[in-house]
Every structure is written in C-alpha cells, then in structure tokens.
Image (spheres, rainbow, N blue to C red):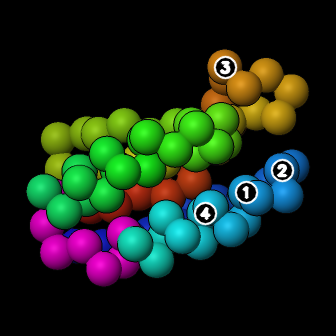
Amino acid sequence: MEVRIENMIFGWHEKLPEMFIELLNTLVLTKDEQDVRGVMEVFARKKLFNALFAFGYGAHHLWVTQKKASDPDQCLENRLLIVEF
C-alpha cells in the first residue's frame, strides 16, 4: 500500500484540513484494497466529507480530489492524493 499526496489542499473551509488529516491518517493504516474500500465507505457517509472531497477507484488505486469552493458540484482538475494497492 502506498499513499501519495500529489497536490496541496486549499483550505477554503475551516474543517477541510482536519478532515483531510483524518482521512490521510486512516488510509495510512490500511493493509489492502478491502481496508481502503471500507475506510471510504465510512467517509462517504459523512456529509461534510462529501461537500469537500470527491473520490473514485481505478483498477489498482483510489483517488481523492478536492471540490471547488465556488461550485461544489465541480472538482479541482488535479488529484489531491492517490492510494495504490
């Protein structure tokens, strides 16, 4: 498992850095793809997480990106982090 931060976060919401660190710390402790998916199920149930971030899966990775402050239905163009499994 490798967790890699690819871009800086934009702290447009006061809880954004805290939520990101909580996500990062939790992902670092995962051991396999099943753990990662379980973690993301928990975070996906959090209303604030969904307002701040978007995520998805590739064949062998999880990606997370930050949503735009000006339009929460759109994401920033670069990934925030990637977890390769």
Q: Which residue is mark 3?
A: 73
User: Where residue 76 sits in the image (x, y, percent)?
Assistant: 68, 36
The circle drawn on residue 16 is 1
Above/below status of 50 relative to 27: above
Judge the density around disc 2: few (<14), some (14-19), many (≥20) Cα neighbours within 10 Å. few
Above/below status of 65 relative to 83: above
In the rendered image, the quadrant that contains the N terminus is bottom left
Q: Which residue is mark 2?
A: 13
Q: Are marks 1 and 4 in contact (CB under 8 Å)?
A: yes
**63 or 35: which is nearer to us?**
35
Q: Are marks 4 and 2 in contact (CB under 8 Å)?
A: no
Judge the density around disc 4: few (<14), some (14-19), many (≥20) Cα neighbours within 10 Å. some
Q: Are marks 3 and 4 in contact (CB under 8 Å)?
A: no
User: Where residue 8 sits in the image (x, y, percent)?
Assistant: 71, 62
Judge the density around disc 3: few (<14), some (14-19), many (≥20) Cα neighbours within 10 Å. few
Q: Are marks 1 and 2 in contact (CB under 8 Å)?
A: yes
Mark closer to the chain start, 3 or 2: 2
Q: Which residue is mark 4?
A: 20
In space, the residues marked 1 and 4 are separated at their CA atoms by: 6 Å
The circle drawn on residue 37 is none
Which residue is at a point 59% across and 72% down the rendered structure image? Answer: 21
Q: Is residue 5 left or right of residue 17?
A: left
Q: Using the rendered image of the protein, determine whether residue 65 is visible from the camera's viewpoint.
A: no
Instruction: Please state the extent of the stretch shown in magenta in the rendering.
Output: 27-33
In space, the residues marked 4 and 2 are separated at their CA atoms by: 11 Å
Which residue is at a point 41% across and 57% down the rendered structure image? Answer: 82
In the rendered image, the quadrant that contains the C terminus is bottom left
Mark closer to the chain start, 3 or 4: 4
Amino acid bearing label 1: Leu
